[in-house]
Structures are given as structure tokens and as C-alpha cells.
Image (tube, grey):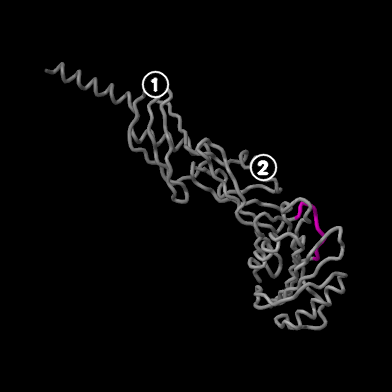
Amino acid sequence: MKTARIAGLLAAVTLLGCKLDVLEIETKVRAELTSRGWEFQDVTCATPLKKRIGEKTSCTVKDRDGDSYAVPVEVTASSGELRVAPDMRVLDQKTLGGLSKEIGEGGSVVCPRPVTPVPTGKTVHCELSRDDDFETEVEVSAAANGTLHWQVTDVSVKRKGFSMRVPPDWRRPSKPVDVPKGGVSITQLKRVKAGYSLASLVVVPVVGETAPWNASDLASCQSVARTVATQAGAKYRDAKIVDGPAGPTCKMMVLGTDSSTPLESEMTYVKGTTGTWMITCNHDPRDEVAPKSCDQALLGFKLE
């Protein structure tokens, strides 16, 4: 009887020595994630593991933002060594450098933390940091095969007195454009059709007005538009009152006279409490997409 009890105790001790309990697994997972530079609130593992190569379990990691995701754990040696293989990619300095080059707009991708996990099926919101006033938001997600996907979701620019959201598929010009101080220029990423002129949108401050006029009055709007067309050597096409960032305002439309480079300009006058701006959309007269994009930019123009 006594011999049987001793044998049972020895068997139990042997069994315990062949297992990793939950606390041991959690400790190893925490240490591994910490060594990779991850930031998290907690790690929870539900089941122990036999010290047998190939044994697997899954732990739950709660990240700094309170989101939870599964982390597969596998025994790789009979001594109890574990392989912590999160079902995700990690945005570290090297990965972000490659991502910045792939986006190809200059600057560096900056994410919420130095080392950012990207679980499969989840999206991480980052920014493209550049040495200018453009702010670019980038979404990064990971596919099941580990491939990272990105897309630019929002671009905005800020100047003294205003900010403006940049329409999709428009960016700052690839080459410097001579714009008066306090202004900004953006352009289409590609032509709508081969042979069309590349559209642009330019915001410039209006200074030195000697004769104030009522931009919400149609007759005044048409008169000013005709004068602008004459001074620019262009042809007057139309003028109307539209809803602007500061209320009803004048929108003037003129046509360039250079037949080799057809160009239509739509100019919207915006007068705020801290300044006045002319928002000009230059596009090919055949381009029906650009004017809609410029209208989007006008809707996203906010007076500061």
C-alpha cells in the first residue's frame, strides 16, 4: 500500500515536470513580447502545455489601447522552450522605412508607438510626417499571408487663416510651384484621360483690394468676373453665387485663349474675418472629374 502511494507521488511529480503551467507560459510570452518592444496591458493564457515539441496553445494579449488579439504559442523543445508567433505583422523602424519608400511621397510613416503590432484583419492608423504643412493619414492592415497593405485615407494642409482637406487622388505638386506666401497649390496625381491637361487647385491670399465689393451679389460677381477675364487675357464664360466657407460668395469661370493648351479656370472668392482668399481650379475644359474634386476641396476649406 505504502509502495503504491510512493509510486503515485513519483508519477505526479514526473507529470508536473513535463508540463508548463499557465503562469509559466504567460511569463514567457510577456518576456518575448517585451523583448520585441511591444507595449501591452496584460497577457492571459487559458491552458497549460506539455513539454512536447509541437504542442500548441493560444494566449490573449490586451494592447495599450485595450484591444485584444490572439497570440499562438508552440513548444519547440522538450525543455519547454516556446515559440511565440503572433498572427500579425509588426511595424518597427525597418518596416516603416520600407513602407515610407513604397508610398513614395517623401517623409516618414509615423505610427502611434515605436513598435506597433498589426493583427491580421485589423487596421492601424498612422501618419506620413513631412517637413511641410501637409498632414497625411495612412491606414495599414495585414493580410492573412502576412502582407502589409496601406492606403492614404486623408490629406489636409494648413496655412495661416485656413485649413483645407485635399481631395482623393490629389497631392502637393511633385515640383515646387511659385505660390504667394500664405497660399498653397495641389494637383491631380494623374490625368483623367491621355491628352488632357493636368488639373491644379491654387489658393492665394487676396491683398491690396482698393474697391471692396459685395461677393454675394450676382451683378457684382458678373462684373468682377468680366474684369478678371479681361485682365488675364481670357474669355469670360460664367459667374454665379455659390455656398462658400463663409456663406454665399462669387464663383467666376473663364476660359484660356491658348488653343494648344486648353484651360478653364473656376475662381471662388472667400472672405473671412482674418483674411480673403481666391481659390482657383484650373482644368481641361473636357475634364468633368476635376471640377467635382475642386468642389470637394471647397467643402473642406475651413476658416481658422
The residue segment tinted magenta is: 173-180
In screen coordinates, is 117 left or right of 242?
Answer: left
- Name the residue rendered at 62%, 51% in the picture: 152
Residue located beneath label 2 in the image: 102
Instruction: Provide residue 3's location: percent of width, then percent of height.
Output: 15, 16
Local secondary structure at mark 1: loop
Question: Is 75 above or below relative to 260?
Answer: above
Name the one closer to the observer, 236 or 109: 236
* Number of dots carrying numbers: 2
Identify the image quadrant of residue 179: bottom right
Kind of residue at badge 2: Glu
Q: Earlier in the sequence, mark 1 or mark 2?
A: 1
In screen coordinates, is 247 left or right of 267?
Answer: left
In reply to whether residue 50 is colored magenta, the answer given is no
Tell me the quadrant of the picture where the C terminus can be found: bottom right
Instruction: Provide residue 133's location: percent of width, then percent of height.
Output: 70, 59
Question: CB of mark 1 within 8 Å of CB of mark 2?
Answer: no
Residue located beneath label 1 in the image: 78
Kind of residue at badge 1: Ser
Most frequent secondary structure within the magenta stretch: loop
Instruction: Provide residue 62's location: percent of width, then percent of height.
Output: 43, 46
Q: Residues within 10 Å of mark 1 (few under 14, many from 20)?
A: some
Question: Is 269 above or below relative to 121?
Answer: below
Instruction: Provide residue 239's location: percent of width, then percent of height.
Output: 74, 75
